[in-house]
Image (spheres, grey):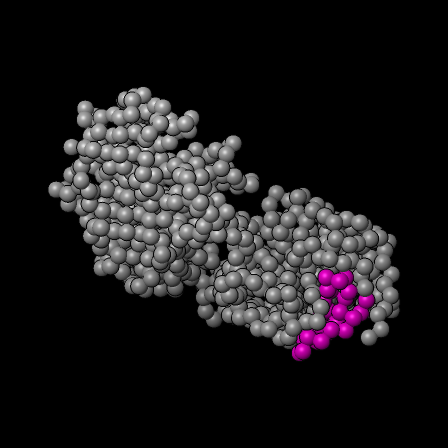
Amino acid sequence: MLTLAVIALSMSATAVKHRKMYGYFLNNSALPGYGYSEFYMDDLLNANLVFPYSNSVGIFAGACANNVFYACEYVFNQYGPQASDFIAYDLVSGKKTVIGPWTTESDVSLKLQDMTYDYTTQTMYAVGFQYGVSALYTVNLETAELTKVANLSTICGTIAANKKGELYAIGTNGKLYLVNKNDGAMAEICDTQRKGMLSNQSMEFDLSNGKLYWAACTNSNPENDERNTYLIEMDLSKNPVEMENLGQVGVYSALLSLYIPFVEGGDNAPAAPTALTVEADQDGKLSATLRWKNPTTTFSGDELTAISTVTIVRNGLPIATIDAAAPGAEMSYTDSSIEKDGAFRYSIYCSSAEGEGEHGNIFTYVGHDYPAQVTGMKAQVGEGCSSITLSWEAPQAGFNNGFFSTEGLSYKIVRMPDETVVAEGLTGNSYTDQSLRRLGRYTYTVYACNAYGETAAAMPGSYVLGKALDIPVEQDFGDLTYFTNQWQATDANNDGFTWTYYSPYGYYQFGNTLVCVEYILNPTIGVAEEDANEWIITPPLNFEADKTYQVRVTARSISDEVLDVTLGSTNEVAKQVKVDRLIISPTEGEPMPTTDYIAQLPAGTDGVRCVGLHLCSDLPFDGYSYIQIAAINIEEAGETGISDIHASRGALLRNGHLIVLPEGCDAATLYNMSGQEVMQTAANQLSTETLPSGIYLLQTTLNGKKQSYKIQVGR
């Protein structure tokens, strides 16, 4: 197809209309955060956040349909963006709804680039990129199902549907294409002279005037600017296509999910009514009164001289038409034809000889409402993790702010993953679950219920509960399902950076890859710049008072790491009490071998207890810090006397209480676990016979190099 020339203006040469626009700013230095925002076409540098995002959640792509934004979210973690939910954010009600996962692919290779809604077929389209190929997709707005239509011959980063339902896309080569909705065939329209898209972006038609708008951020453009986004207006009705740069959008911004409110009747149809309010009957009766002020201007801002009718729409269906309304008149209407309790979206629009005007939208709930979510939820794990007590505060309003009474309010509790209704019909605000028959990780949902419905609220966190295990217990991280179902890993400093599993990083630090749990404390790049405060806590274990127990940790590190051993009546961090300290130290060898470190549990430990490992190393600002734990064993202790904790070094000899130091050792100092020096010698041996039972740290100097050994003194 013949490529048309483009008239490209460096900046807007005509007066830009004061038109509201919406979009999702993934980045914008002019905003205090990121998320869905509103701004005006003639004031692109300034925007207002209307639905902020947080907690490392963003979107790949999105589009608006009938005042509802749909988007494919992701969650960003230490491995990068991970595909998450397909959501709907309602501009009228302000509510966000999760529809479902938009992909089930575990490798997250599919990246959606942009989306658009075709009003002629009520279809959401998307362009996506996977394994070096762009493709056209449809998205089911009810189920979130993503269906590939066809591969595209050119890698495309944006897509938009015009009023006739035709699809247009822009490739990373800067060319605009007409895309066949059935087979993905692409016909070149023009060259925008903007090549190399720097991030996900968006474009959309203004369905009122037919012009195409692109929030363009490219590394090749007439502005010679590789950091900022510009709003490009294209008039496809002209031959050649006319293009204008309307100005910079935000500061260093990435704008997705572009939406331009439009009017069926065009620019000369009436603007939306103003001062729109709705009041549901205060006693729960099925009626609602709407009030508004008729517009005095057209959608384009010119004076409105006449209104032929005013139409009231409820949930997409017209319910009333009022004739002979005057511009600027204050009006009202009471809707008494509602048949049942529910949430209702009202639209009011004025019509003129030009056609249907802009809609004014408002949302309300009419009638008796079901309860809002419970609040103040707390969970207290019972002794030995055999039970859990849940508590909450009663809702004081309806979920939709409709008429609500606490009369008849009750609660239902559902436990997962066994899908057990552990209680229902509760009238109190707490419940203790003692029905746990097997050890596992459980979550709970509390439902607030009345005669009109129920609302679920997930109890924060998940809890390892159930029957205690008999000792010995070993965890070698070979089965992560077993680990996550029975062991508790906690990021106690809440910095979002915690234990990782099976990563490839160990190969570069230790010389080989190890099946393990690991933690990198330093170096960091702008994240997790805090002292370590990470926990691993065992399942509940059965102890007997007449036996002696020890904790054996198989680990390696590139610097000295502090690992406190704790004991508690539950697997909650707050219930753990320090009983010993292990210092995990580097060892020689390529690859670096792991070493067994042993901590003795207190004599007389009895009943059901949980053992914790608390990594509490200080952040080293001038060095590296990396620890791997290959195994954790809770077992009965061996013989008393001296135990060579660093047995793999083979440097110490022992005979009862006598320690024979390595040949050539210059000096040796023995410390207790409080860091106090208890013995020093320059001889080739020392005796621990006079020392109290416990754990000690022995530091030797051999050929000017210091080595640390952990020893156990027993009776």
Task: Determine the image quadrant of residue 420.
Answer: bottom left
Q: Which residue is drawn at 47% across and 56% down?
A: 401
Specify the quadrant that holds the C terminus. top left
Q: Position of residue 557 (x, y in %)?
A: 42, 41
Q: Where is residue 298 in the image (x, y as percent from the top left)?
A: 76, 60
In this view, the residue in front, 570 or 16, is 570
Q: Can residue 352 be seen in this view?
A: no
In this view, the residue in front, 452 or 523, is 523
Residue range of the region highlighted in magenta in the rendering: 164-190
In this view, the residue in front, 107 or 699, is 699
Q: Position of residue 1 (x, y in %)?
A: 82, 75
Name the side, left or right, on which 38 lies relative to 713.
Answer: right
Q: Does the magenta stretch include residue 322?
A: no
Q: Which residue is drawn at 15% across and 43% down?
A: 547
Q: Residue at x 27, y 60 (%)?
A: 422
Q: Position of residue 524 (x, y in %)?
A: 53, 40
Name the side, left or right, on which 177 lies relative to 610.
Answer: right
Task: Determine the image quadrant of residue 688.
Answer: top left
Q: Which residue lies furthest to the bottom in this view?
A: 182
Q: Is residue 541 visible?
A: yes
